[in-house]
Image (tube, rainbow, N blue to C red):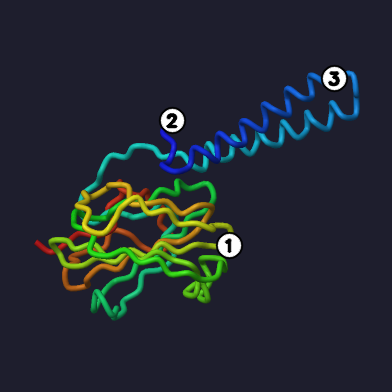
Amino acid sequence: MRIAQDSKSWIYFFIFLSIIFLVLSLVLIQFNILFIMLLIFSFIFFLIFLFLLLFFRDPNRKIGSGVLACADGKIRSITNLKDEIIGDCICISTFMNLHNVHVNRSPFDGIVDNIKHISGIHLPAFKKESEKNERVITIINTSIGNLKIVQIAGTFARRIVPYISKGDKIKKGDRIGIIRFGSRVDLYLPKNKINKLNIKIGDIVLAGEDSIAEVNG
């Protein structure tokens, strides 16, 4: 199983703790209460290890056509609005639960024009007030104009880790970063370049695989 970049240390830490407590429990097996307590802690750390192994999985994907989903999860909103960078655009919000793969991917070929980290609070990512949450804004210059990806931290997501830098040339479906422990990704598409949306509110999508829109031409 492929593990997400910059995440292996978390997994190694908890399996190490599990083994240490297991060894200690066996060493102190003659002390019944202490043995049981150490064994319980070893089991708890092992469960955390299994959870992190599942959470930080990063499967390979069959790259789809058109504009791709940036994140695994449920489409929560599709909004027409005017953005200061993109102009008239369609904003597609995808909410990731704990069971989703949390590695985000590029929706289209292009060059990273800018990446900006904005500090903030950590409200649930599905709330309107989450506009004040910590976020990373990525602008990608593509053949259909600028696309904007906003990775938003949630209640438990305390760190957004970009895998790309300004000036990088990226392909559709490339991994662009990870948000840890539940969050949201907003994708802003130039409205005049979108021919058709392939998704609706409530749909479940896979990053880098599912086509969410078709472009003009």
Kindly identify the residue that appears in the image at 50 percent across and 56 percent down: 159
Cα distance in 3D space between marks 2 and 3: 35 Å
Q: Secondary structure at mark 3?
A: loop
User: What is the three-letter code of the residue carrying label 2?
Assistant: Met
Of labels 2 and 3, earlier in sequence is: 2
Residue located at (73% from left, 25% from top): 22
Query: Which mark, by number, is residue 29?
Result: 3
Element type where label 2 sits in the image? loop
Q: Earlier in the sequence, mark 1 or mark 2?
A: 2
Q: Position of residue 126 (x, y in %)?
A: 51, 67
Instruction: State the residue position of label 2.
Output: 1
Q: Is residue 120 above or below residue 21?
A: below
- Which label is found at residue 155? 1
Q: Is residue 21 above or below residue 69?
A: above
Identify the image quadrant of the C terminus.
bottom left
Q: Residue furthest left?
A: 217
Position of residue 206 measured from the top left corner of the image (x, y, whole percent): 37, 48
Which amino acid type corresponds to the residue marked 1 in the rendered image? Thr
Task: Give the structural element (helix, strand or loop) at label 1.
Answer: loop
Between residues 99 and 9, which one lies in front from this camera angle?
Answer: 9
Q: Nearer the viewer, mark 2 or mark 3?
A: 3
Q: How crowded is the residue under tag 3: few (<14 C-alpha within 10 Å), some, or many (20+)?
A: some
Q: Is residue 72 above or below residue 196?
A: above
Q: Are marks 1 and 2 in contact (CB under 8 Å)?
A: no
